[in-house]
Image (cartoon, rainbow, N blue to C red):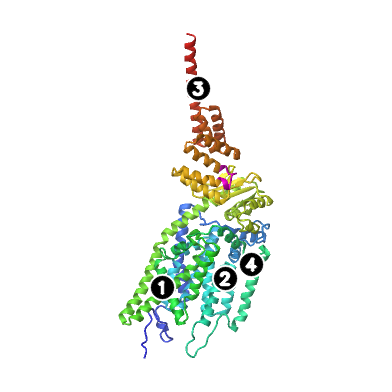
Amino acid sequence: MKKKTARVAIKKPDDNTARRQPFQLSLRSVVIASIVAGGIPLVSTLVYILGFNGAYGFPLDDPWIHLTFARNLVEFGAYSYFKDIVVTSGSTSPLYTFILALGWLFFRQEFLLSYAIGALFFAAAGVYFFHLARIMFDKEDVLAIIATAMFVLIPRVDAAALSGMETSLFVFMLIATMYYYAARRRWAFAVFAGLLVWTRPDGWIMLFALVLNELYRWYVVKPERGGRRESFLFARDMVSPGTVFLSLIMAYTVFNQVLSGSFFPNTLAAKAKYYSAGASSSYWLQVLSFYLGSPMTIIGLGFLASLVFVVVEWIRKKAVEALPSLLFIMGMILGYWVMIPFLYQDGRYLIPTLPFFVLCGVWGWRMALEALADAIPARPVRSIANGALVMLLAVAVVMEAVNWQPQRKKYYWTCRYITDRQVKTARWISANLSPGSVIATHDIGAIGFYSGRRVVDMVGLVSPQVIPMIGNLPALDNFLREQGVTHLAVLRNWFEVVNQRPLYTTNQLYPEIMEVFRFLPGKTHIMSQQASRMNGEAAYLMKLGRYREAFTILRESFKMDPQSSKTVLMIGIAQLAEGDTTRAIQAFQQALKLQPDNVTALASLGMIYSSKKRHWEALRLLKRAVEIVPNDQTYQKTYYDAWSRYRVDSLNAIGWVTEKRSVTFR
């Protein structure tokens, strides 16, 4: 007779012992524990940023996109980005926008409203996660408790709850959908599956993962002796709930088709088009760091073990509890590799996979230690394995809690970063530009919410007409003219405007600089991104004193965009550093033809003329530079130094003439 082996973790109790199970938790206790465990880091983070910033903020610009749609829905009765004029499906998460709009009816403080909604769905996600974990781990409450603690203490997930984005709502919808699938509750599953798509387009990846799991269970898993194959999604009992799901999907499709003529919101196609042109070769390294770096290392090792055991269970033709979670994670990673191969903003697009990553990780460790106990069936080994599993996962929880402080600081700095750029620019526009101004920008969030001006989106999030033009600057220029754009508000590393001076510039000491320009048709010149990147590389080499290498790059940039005054100016500086004064003069003169008020070209050419004793030409150029930037002490000093050299030369000349005359008339 085959010897029966015990499972590592606590086995599911039978009905007679369930009452004595010390870890059976009521729904009320789970709710309270989730709110406390998740609420402490959230409240602490808010107090932290309020103490340092003196105000609340968001760590990215996108939350104001949802808020703008929500506010206009309430105040103008239109799903629009400007009053009731710019009607478009520019919100990635219509469901989140509707929830914000409902909140805006009663409470009109954008930060606290967004924080409250994020925290609410974060707590709800914790409750559902616990119940999902109990199903997955055969009602072993110890594992479910530890897994839930891991989930609610993941620093990235905590920060996402306060990001002002739909992330917490999406995480909740994902977990609830999988819970109702695992619990075989058809009507609830149908409703949540339909609403999941309204939350984010990548909700489809979860639905496809569940379909694949059903196919695996039907075609691969061998039924127990005397049993028969059963399907949850494809059963007859699913027909009526399925009509609810299909109704929600049809409503979603009609909503997007009517507003923007597409199946999905504009944002999906716009971001895919924009980012696909510059696919990151380091995407997979970024993914590894995201999942296996601190504080996720321990749970990441468990996830790697789960991959092995999925294959083992597949070979054995057994059901795999972790398979839906694993398929969802792999689907998200592959989906973004194809569509948006970058892990921007702390990997925010993959944050919704983290609760399922925790489930796979805990399951992987459980299976590994169970395999160890099966291999060495002695009672001490099984006891040690039980204790080791709990201790190992407890250490993972502690690692997450320790990493909470660095994440809080990162959240503070990113909030300040966005405030100092997008928010300050929006408020400057509101205070300094006429109400009829039309602003073209690629960061539409804060500018759309605070400026009170109509916004034309340069990357297609709320202006779907732009999507085919992405990467085509002449077509974009024509579109801006047709839209009556009066000003540009752009980050220099996104759209670099040359040949004219900005009206407003954020702090130039920061890595990204946002500038506001007048849009002058036929004159405003936006550099191609490739030429702009080449200039950035050349600037770095020039800081290192490698002017000849920089000059080589600048020549290629000039061939690509010969109308850029900045490129010509940098060529002149590189030539001057190499001692070629004649060509440097020609370059500075050409730069001034392209941009007559380029103060760097004026000052550089003026200093060369001064050194060559062409004083009147030097003083004319330097005076012009001081008139353009009267408060810049550097240019003032250069002008006064030129005056000093002129006076010295004049005095020397007077002395020479006097001496000659005294000799002549002696």
Residue 423 shows in this picture: no
Q: Residue at x 58, y 38 (%)?
A: 590
Instruction: Kindly identify which residue carries mark 1.
Output: 305
**Alpha-carbon neighbours of circle 3 within 10 Å: few (<14), some, or many (≥20)?**
few
Marks 1 and 3, how far apart at CA: 84 Å
Q: Secondary structure at mark 4?
A: loop
Secondary structure beneath label 3: helix
Quadrant of the image containing the N terminus: bottom left
Q: Are marks 1 and 3 in contact (CB under 8 Å)?
A: no
| Labels 1 and 3: the sequence-earlier one | 1
The amino acid marked with disc number 1 is Ala
Q: CA distance from mark 2 to mark 4?
A: 13 Å
Residue 91 painted magenta: no
Identify residue type, mark 2: Trp
Mark 4 highlights which residue?
A: 263
Sooner in the amino-acid sequence: mark 3 or mark 4: 4
Q: In this picture, is 173 found above or below 109?
A: below
Say which quarter of the image contains residue 154: bottom left
Relative image position of residue 349 (x, y in whole percent):
52, 63
**Quarter of the rendering containing residue 380:** bottom left
On the image, the x and y values in percent for residue 128 come to: 50, 73
